[in-house]
Amino acid sequence: MKKLLLLLAIMALCACSDRDVSGISSVETQNAFLIRVVRGDSMPASNVVARVRAVDFIRNVEPDSVEHFLAEYVADSLGRIRLDGLAVDSVTIEILNEGEGVFRKILAKDVRDGDSVQYVLEKTGSVHGKVYLPDGVDYAWVQVYGTDRLVKTDNEGFYEMDSLPPYEYGLRIIVGDSVVEHSATVGVGEDTRANVCVFEPDSIKVLDFEFAEAQFIIRELDISESGYMSSTDTSVKVSPKVATVPNTRKNIAEFIVDAGVGRDGNALHWKSSAGIGSWSFFGIWVCTENSPCDLSAMDSVVYYVRGTGVISIIFETLGSSNVEGKTLAYDTLKTSDEWRRVSIKPSNFKPRDDLYGNLGWDVISKTVTTISIAAYDDTEVWIDDITLYGVKPSDFITK
């Protein structure tokens, strides 16, 4: 009964009112706002259904809630829709038809002036993304202003919505006890990423060796990259067999092994047995040549390692469009029988000396393209889970 009374009240408001409703002036006009809806070939979009809602309308998250749109119209045989008046200052109009649609905002002033407009149905798009969830929150709600769209994220915060006409949409996100305002611009037939970063963590695991096909993965940014091995050492060994790695790049699948020594999962492992002055390394692109990443806010790089010999953690700037160089920090490995957690600060990186391209942390950290792990002389190394602290996932967005 309450829902019926509410619907009757809204219908009465649309028909005639001179009262204020929720602080918005209500105006009845004698003029008309004429909308002509056409398809991409300029032919009339006859009989399409248009729904009109308040611009601040959002669908309630309650499971038994119903939509209360202000009005519904059906275009005539010439694709025409006539608005005789608006009960509020502004509304949205949404038309969806066979994979095409239109979404617009209409002002009461335009209706009062008796304006006319033509809308062209365009291919709909979609929005996907991630809402970063704070500790203790298992999901979020994503609402779209002026529509009946409402989705619940999964327990990682991922969501998606399809069949959205091209438009710059206002989003309202409910995250636990917080409400976040956001936006997403959908192009014609495009899939748009809209991540909500209010609760974004200030750390990111940049290397995880659980999968041979990709070691650097940020799902919410659609990043998935695999690394490579390179060496001046023609006697590089990999368990359980001996393999050679020439100067050319080599896929690293055979270098990913069981971590062992009480550690779960996989790790990267290789042994360099060359003479003094030779080296071998794993490298991976984490940012593009044309859009290097600024990681200068990094507090520390943390990783797990075991082995014997000497390795270095290297951040590089590569590419012909950049001033190429590197910055590196050394680590001496003492034992293969125990995993240890290593934390390296920016101050631990070797001071700039311009030898072999060493430009120092202050220069390279602002334009990082790749991360490398180098092994020198006679070294055997297992390494896993390299994490940057003080760096957010969104720092890796390519522009």
Image (tube, grey):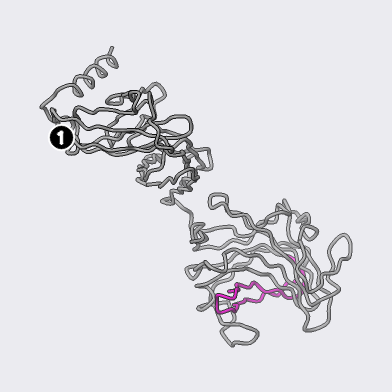
- Please tell me which residue lies in front, 48 or 216: 48
The correct choice, above or below, for 58 with respect to 276 in the image is above
Residue that sits furthest to the top in the current view? 1
The correct choice, above or below, for 394 with respect to 159 in the image is below
Instruction: State left or right for residue 337 relative to residue 193.
Output: right
Q: Secondary structure at mark 1?
A: helix
Find disc 1 in the rendering and name its residue: 112
Q: Residue at coordinates 49% horizontally, 63% vertically from top-left? A: 390
Instruction: State left or right for residue 310 relative to residue 141.
Output: right
Residue that sits furthest to the right in the current view? 241
113 is within the stretch colored magenta: no
317 is within the stretch colored magenta: yes
- Please tell me which residue lies in front, 84 or 305: 84
The x and y percentages for residue 239 are 85, 61
- Please tell me which residue lies in front, 37 or 227: 37
The x and y percentages for residue 156 are 53, 42
Instruction: State left or right for residue 41 relative to residue 283.
Output: left
The x and y percentages for residue 241 are 89, 62
The correct choice, above or below, for 101 with respect to 349 in the image is above
The x and y percentages for residue 11 are 23, 20
Q: Residue at coordinates 73% horizontally, 54% vertically from top-left? A: 212
Q: Amino acid at mark 1?
A: Arg
Write down the quadrant of residue 329 in the picture: bottom right
The correct choice, above or below, for 110 with respect to 389 in the image is above
Write down the quadrant of residue 259 in the picture: bottom right
**Residue numbers of the magenta segment:** 306-334
Quadrant including the N terminus: top left
